[in-house]
Amino acid sequence: MKNNRITRRFFIGSGLVGTFSLLNIKKSWARREELKIPVGMQKSETVKDDSYILKIHGNPKSIQLLQVTDIHFNPYRRDKKIDDTTKDIVKKLLDITQPHLLSVTGDVWNENAFGRGLMYLEQAVEFFGSLSIPWFYTWGNHDILGDYSKGHDLLASAKNSMYRGGINMGNYQVIVENESNQKLWRFVCLNTNNYGLMEEQRKWLELWSSKNINISIPTFMACHIPVYQYHTIWENKIASGVKFEKVCFEKEQGESLAYIKKIPGLKACICGHDHVNDYSGVIEGVDLIYGRATGKGGYGSDYVPKGGKLYSLYPSTGEYEWVSVTPNNKRWYPTKGTQIEKKEELPWLNELEEK
Ligand SMILES: [Fe+2]
């Protein structure tokens, strides 16, 4: 392990020490046990459909998707400016990139200490709803609630939200259509809960794929926690980009890719979770892509500047391209075959924040 690698244990540990007394650390760990209840154990009371159709005007040559991830809002953080800065980053990225839709791939708030999870979620959906852009969301491991039924409903009823995960454990799809009802692109949104894509998501995926076998639209899968093969593509030098931490695939051990591959029309999988990894590579026909971490409340801006990832999707050919974007409109895409693991080799070394 190299000295300049950051571990998730470091992040979680330092966050707790800074925020809670010793007594509350114990309480916090007890609450983390609640995470073992998968989001899908509670269903929405009102949402009955697991698909959202987004109509876009005209017939654009490409669809622009902006992905933001690992937002880490925490209104109770001592430094109140941090969340405002994160909101500014998201707004600036939208201004710069002018996308058709926004993807928020999890870790939007900061757990459920003192039962505050629902309030964090309310504030988050108010913010994303105010951005005047259709947005979809996937659950992150820090997005914890006491009552997931209310969470599903809040997410589905939020302004401009395309969330439809209320009846299928947080799993759903978004289909983009033009005015002639032609299906242009699809996003399969999966809830990786606390441990990655496990048995219940695989079962859902298998059933969903078999039902959609004849509907082959260019498709992205979106989720929070990477599958094991994000590790493989780096170690086997298939991937290009930057990597400063271990791939945190949690309990997923590589079995999920076989299920993911069955998604008709699948091109790529986009995720978050590991804030200082930004790379992509194709394995078994699936492009595994890390989003660029966005939230100032999360670790990593001393290695990888906070920003977002812009995807240009070309429905007529199924091709796509991505570029990472920072709020000062610097854009970065790795030269093929480049693998950066040393800080001094970073192209943005002069822009990094001190720890
Ligand atoms: Fe995460």
Image (cartoon, helix red, strand yellow):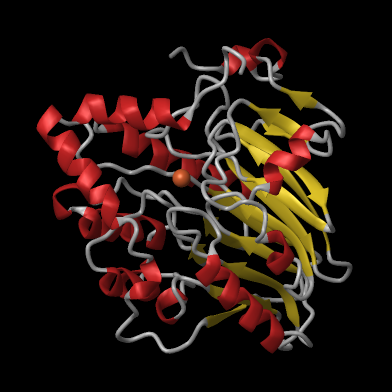
User: Vertically, is 152 above or below 320?
Assistant: below
Is 179 positioned to the left or the right of 285 in the image?
left
Q: Residue 296: x, y in percent?
A: 41, 33
Is 112 displayed left or right of 264 in the figure?
left
Residue 146, quarter of picture = bottom left
Q: Nearer the viewer, residue 157 or 171?
A: 171
Where is 83 relative to 6, above or below? below
On the question of residue 318 being in view, the answer is yes
Q: Nearer the viewer, residue 59 or 190?
A: 190
The quarter in which the C terminus is drawn is top left
Q: Is any part of residue 21 visible from this angle?
A: no
Q: Position of residue 333 (x, y in %)?
A: 76, 35
The residue lying toward the viewer, choosing from 272 and 185, is 272
Q: Residue at x 79, y 44 (%)?
A: 281
Residue visible at 83% across and 33% down? 237
Tell me residue 177's x, y (percent): 68, 80
Left or right placement of residue 346 versus residue 139 in this view: right
Name the residue: 48% across, 87% down: 49
Counting labels gives: 0
- Quarter of the image that includes the N terminus: top right
Tell me what residue is drawn at x 55 percent, y 17 percent: 352
Residue 266, x across and y down, in percent:
76, 67
